[in-house]
Image: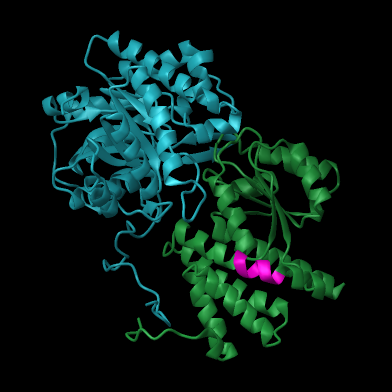
Chain colours: A cyan, B green
């Protein structure tokens, strides 16, 4: 089934996605604790400005301001009755900016995690999770999103629930997970596992990969792992602009535009086709990334040494798919096996 | 791995083997087995406090270490904590009756402006799993919430969590208020959250920065041990 994103992917060797949403909105005066999604209705000009920042910096794809727009997250602000509306408006504003740009730009409807832990470990049922994603996704589609985009997911169960919602909506979709714990996601998913379960879904995503996590180096190590696990999958890399540092009372991300330009080129060499940033990635980073992707010829897959030399060291010894010695993760000596 | 599939009958194990078996069962999140083991040890005349510390807290310590070292991940840890809580539910009334020392009580919440609560929830569950009593204030807490709760609950520990770089400075507001009220030294203040680091914890006057939930439990335990020693030597 062809759609705006698959069409663009078929015409290009790489696509530039967008950067940070939160970091940009805080710079525009969003106060902490306030859900950014309310600004879609209350401060539409600022949301348009956020979107234009990515478009003018050369993004081919940008994500809507709807990351926390599911019932579970909005409930924390007593706004769970506004899921449909806030998602629809997020996409409408994006559609308007994309259509006014004069070039082909994909509006991706951002969908973040519910923030709940799913059964049996946690309390959120599969059925409720599917309903929540369906509700948010329906609003985004109604507002004109070309594709729905799951991001920063940690649990396989949650991604599977979201995928089922995508199927119900008959929506083209993409999905990325956040690998932030010793090379795996918080819930223990490895890069290898991501490729395996995504490609095994009844309605596999158009593209999948990693976003956020720790720094740009870790994200590329994940990307190498995903690439090794799938021959044909279209991969997404959306790494943070470095790591947040507390300097004299202020926070800043230590990734410069130059560093993110190097990251973008390396991400392509690691096998990613859709390349963008996450937290800390501003329009000036995106411009540098676009310029680097346009002017640098593709190269061979970089080694881990080369990545850490150019972007800084890794946060853990291994990528979590294998231990530091390269064998499968150690099994604890068992006293008893359950029959 | 054992190659025989023989079911082990918990009640046939010696005390020593049963403790080790229960630690394994905790590791695997086997709730019914933990409940059964807890009852067996009580029936054998073990002090409730000893049942709490040796198989349960001892087992959760192993879980905590493997979580810290990237061998176990959140789902396994939560299953283990649930099993631990099932054992605790049996022990709790008995512990109160026998006047056993408390592990400690913690008030925890994300700071004002911060709505990100997964890390905080994880610390809550791990702390409960380690035998602490936890009062969870939820998200977005102004300083008054913390102050009121630690006083009312007679807590030992205050835990604050922030995910955003814009909200973490609020932790200093809470600590400064505690200092103003002359109550800072009555509590151990632990802080955590993705953008924090040790340097920041020191800068704002917290007792410790905890990198993850396992470290939070270890840190809380060591502060409680010091407190108990001080009381014992007073």
Note whether residue A261 is visible: no
- Among the 4 quarters of the image, the one containing residue B38: bottom right
Instruction: Give the magenta range.
Output: B85-91
Residue B78 in the image: x percent, y percent? 51, 59
Q: Nearer the viewer, residue A175 or A53?
A: A175
Residue B57 vertical placement versus B187 (above, below): below
Image point 39% across, 42% down: which residue? A153
Across the whole image, how many numbered discs are drawn on residues? 0
Depicted A235 relative to depicted A283: above or below: below
A11 and B189: which is toward the camera: A11
Residue A110: in sight, yes or no?
yes
Main SS, magenta region, reads helix
Q: Position of residue B170 (x, y in %)?
A: 67, 36
Q: Quadrant of residue A169?
A: top left
Residue at 50% in and 40% down:
A245
Quarter of the image with the C terminus of chain B is: bottom right
Report the quarter where the N terminus of chain B lies: bottom left
Quadrant of residue B154 in the image?
bottom right
Q: Nearer the viewer, residue B5 or B59?
A: B5
Q: Position of residue A112 (x, y in %)?
A: 42, 35
In the image, taking residue A141 as reference, residue A280 lies left or right, namely right
Instruction: Tell me what residue is drawn at x 38 percent, y 14 percent.
Output: A92
Left/right of residue B91 with respect to residue B85 in the rendered view: right
Question: Does the segment drawn in magenta span residue B4?
Answer: no
Residue A50 percent across, percent down from the top left: 42, 18
């Amino acid at each position: 089934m062809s759609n705006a994103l698959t069409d663009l992917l078929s015409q290009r060797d790489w696509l530039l996605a967008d950067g940070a949403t939160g970091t940009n909105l805080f710079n525009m005066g969003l106060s902490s604790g306030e859900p950014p999604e309310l600004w879609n209705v209350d401060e539409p000009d600022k949301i348009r400005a956020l979107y234009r920042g990515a478009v003018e910096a050369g993004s081919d794809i940008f994500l809507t301001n709807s990351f926390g727009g599911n019932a579970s997250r909005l409930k924390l602000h007593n706004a769970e009755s506004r899921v449909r509306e806030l998602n629809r408006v997020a996409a409408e504003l994006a559609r308007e900016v994309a259509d006014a740009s004069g070039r082909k730009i994909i509006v991706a409807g951002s969908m973040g995690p519910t923030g709940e832990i799913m059964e049996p470990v946690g309390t959120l049922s599969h059925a409720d999770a599917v309903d929540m994603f369906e509700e948010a996704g329906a609003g985004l589609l109604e507002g004109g999103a070309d594709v729905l985009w799951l991001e920063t997911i940690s649990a396989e169960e949650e991604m599977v629930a979201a995928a089922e919602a995508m199927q119900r909506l008959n929506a083209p979709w993409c999905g990325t997970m956040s690998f932030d714990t010793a090379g795996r996601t918080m819930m223990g998913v490895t890069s290898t596992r991501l490729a395996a379960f995504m490609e095994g879904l009844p309605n596999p995503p158009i593209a999948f990969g990693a976003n956020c996590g720790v720094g740009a180096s870790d994200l590329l190590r994940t990307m190498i792992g995903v690439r090794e696990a799938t021959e044909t999958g279209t991969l997404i890399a959306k790494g943070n602009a470095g790591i947040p540092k507390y300097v004299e009372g202020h926070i800043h991300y230590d990734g410069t535009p130059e560093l993110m330009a190097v990251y973008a080129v390396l991400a392509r060499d690691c096998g990613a086709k859709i390349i963008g940033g996450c937290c800390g990635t501003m329009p000036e980073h995106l411009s540098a990334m676009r310029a680097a992707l346009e002017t640098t010829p593709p190269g061979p897959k970089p080694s881990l040494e080369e990545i850490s030399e150019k972007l800084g060291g890794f946060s853990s010894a291994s990528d979590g798919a294998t231990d530091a010695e390269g064998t499968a993760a150690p099994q604890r000596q068992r006293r008893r096996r359950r029959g | 791995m054992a190659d025989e599939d023989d079911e082990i009958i918990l009640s046939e194990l010696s005390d020593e083997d049963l403790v080790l078996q229960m630690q394994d069962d905790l590791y695997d999140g086997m709730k019914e087995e933990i409940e059964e083991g807890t009852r067996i040890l009580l029936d054998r005349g073990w002090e409730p406090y000893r049942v709490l510390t040796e198989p349960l807290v001892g087992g959760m310590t192993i879980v905590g270490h493997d979580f810290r070292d990237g061998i176990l991940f959140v789902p396994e840890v939560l299953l283990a904590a649930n099993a631990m809580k099932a054992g605790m539910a049996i022990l709790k009334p008995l512990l109160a009756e026998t006047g056993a020392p408390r592990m400690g009580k913690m008030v925890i919440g994300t700071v004002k402006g911060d709505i990100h609560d997964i890390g905080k929830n994880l610390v809550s569950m791990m702390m409960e799993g380690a035998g602490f009593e936890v009062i969870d204030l939820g998200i977005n807490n102004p300083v008054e919430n913390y102050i009121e709760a630690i006083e009312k609950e007679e807590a030992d520990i205050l835990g604050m969590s922030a995910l955003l770089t814009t909200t973490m400075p609020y932790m200093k507001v809470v600590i400064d208020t505690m200092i103003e009220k002359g109550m800072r030294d009555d509590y151990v203040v632990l802080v955590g959250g993705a953008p924090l680091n040790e340097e920041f914890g020191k800068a704002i006057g917290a007792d410790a920065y905890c990198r993850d939930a396992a470290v939070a439990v270890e840190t809380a335990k060591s502060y409680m041990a010091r407190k108990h020693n001080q009381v014992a030597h007073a």
